[in-house]
Amino acid sequence: MKDSKLKIFDEYVNSIENEENRSKFIEVLEFVISEFPYLETVIKWNQPMFLDHGTYIIAFNVTTKHINVAPEKATMIYFNELIKSKDVAYTMMFIQMKWEKPIDFELLKEIIVHNIMEKKDTISFWR
């Protein structure tokens, strides 16, 4: 990984055994950093996270079948209908982007922009 903001994620990324999955996950992280370069990159609860002024914006983790996108429950509720219309699986807390399908970067961007705007005055980590 070339970007110094990604360096913090090296250990996590290197633990992804499947090379194609690792590359796809790096692509997701690079997308967030390129679109939102001011977000802080951290590892918390053993997963890559992005913060804005110390408040949680989004996190990602991997399973053998998909990338979990964790935008917070309130955001999942807000985007419920949009998420249902997309080609992704989901739970109450996660959007699950299957390894074999293209990453929905438009959805990721919309969720991140929403969280940044919604939490611009938030002083706590979580909502």
Image (spheres, rainbow, N blue to C red):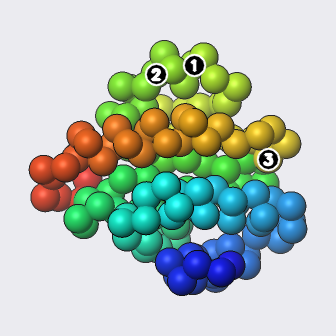
Corner quadrant of residue 111: top left
Disc 1 vs disc 2: Cβ atoms closer than 8 Å?
yes
Check disc 1 and report the residue beneath it.
84
Helix, strand or loop under label 2: helix
Rendered location of residue 36, percent (x, y): 43, 58
The quadrant holding residue 28 is: bottom right
| Left or right of residue 38: residue 61 | right
> SS of the residue at dot 1?
helix
Residue 80 has which mark?
2
Q: What is the secondary structure assignment of the residue under circle 3?
A: loop
* Amino acid of disc 3: Trp
Write the residue at 26% across / 42% down: 117
Q: Quadrant of the N terminus?
A: bottom right
Taking the image as shown, residue 3 lies to the left or right of residue 79, namely right
What amino acid is at disc 2?
Asn
> For this rendering, which residue is in front, 34 or 63?
34
Q: Is the residue marked by circle 1 packed among few (<14), some (14-19), or many (20+) residues within 10 Å?
A: few
At horizontal 43% and vertical 25% (from top left) the residue drawn is: 79
Judged left or right of residue 112, residue 25 is: right
* Residue designated by label 3: 99
Vertical placement of 60 versus 72: above or below?
below
Q: Residues within 10 Å of mark 2 (few under 14, many from 20)?
A: few
Residue type at mark 1 is: Lys
Is residue 44 at all visible to an observer of this figure? no
Circles 2 and 3, Cβ within 8 Å, touching? The answer is: no
How far across and down, in percent of the image, does residue 88 sit? 67, 30
Mark earlier in primary sequence (2, 3): 2
